[in-house]
Image (tube, rainbow, N blue to C red):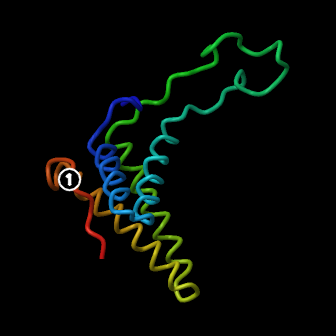
Amino acid sequence: MSSIETGPIRDALRTAVRYAMKSRDRSALGVYRSALAAIDNAEAVPLRREHRAGAIEASAAGPGRADVPRRDLTEQDMRAVVQGEIDERCAAAQSLAGVQPAAERQLRDEAALLQELLDGTDPDHSGGAPTHPPERS
C-alpha cells in the first residue's frame, strides 16, 4: 500500500488519534502518533549512494528529481510494525520493573492500548476497524 492508500490498521490508528485529540488524552495521542510514524518510517526507502550529500554541481537538478517511491507495505507488514512497537514497550517496561514503577506502568498501558487496537482490527478477530478507540482504564 502506498502512504496515500489506507488499510484497517492505519485507519484505526488515525481514528484513535482523532478520538484522543477530542478527549485531550495526550498519552494515548502520543502512542497512536508514534505507531503511525513507525509505519511511515517503515515505508521509507533506504538511501542509496546517489542520495548522499556532496557537491552541489553533482546533485540532481529540478524539483522531485531525487525523489523515489516509498515502499509498499501490506496490511500484515503494518501490523508487524505495530506489534514491534508493542514489543519494544513491553521490553522497556520489563527493564524498568521495580526500578521506576510509574514509567513501567505507563509503558505497559501504552502497549495495552496498541494491543487492543491491533486486536480490534484483526480480520480473524472482529472483521474490521473499530468504530472507537480502545477504552482506557
Q: Which residue is mark 1?
A: 130
Judging from the image, what secondary structure is the residue with disc 1 in? Answer: loop
Q: Is residue 64 above or below residue 132?
A: above
Q: Position of residue 41 (x, y in %)?
A: 52, 42
Q: Residue at x 28, y 63 (%)?
A: 116
**Which image quadrant for residue 59?**
top right
Q: In the shown orientation, is residue 114 left or right of residue 124?
A: right
Residue 57: x %, y % from top left? 83, 12
Q: Quadrant of the C terminus?
A: bottom left
Q: Is residue 10 left or right of residue 85?
A: left
Vertically, is 97 above or below 112? below
| Three-letter amino acid code of the residue under disc 1 | Pro
In the orientation shown, which residue stands out farthest toward the bottom?
98
Total numbered labels placed on residues in the image: 1
Neighbor class of circle 1 (other Cα within 10 Å; few <14, some 14-19, many 20+) is many
Q: Residue at x 36, y 31 (%)?
A: 1
* Image location of residue 131, percent across then percent down: 19, 52
Which residue is drawn at the image coordinates 51% and 86% (left, top)? 101
Relative to 107, is 22 above or below?
above
| Most foreground residue, 78 or 34 | 34
Work out which residue is located at the far left of the displayed protein and give it.
Answer: 127
The x, y position of residue 123, in whole percent, is 18, 48
Residue 42 in the figure: left or right of residue 13: right
| Towards the viewer: 1 or 137 | 137
Query: On the rendered structure, is 59 left or right of 122?
Result: right
Q: What residue lies at 67% left-to-right and 26% top-to-bottom?
A: 48
Q: Which of 27/9 is in front?
A: 27
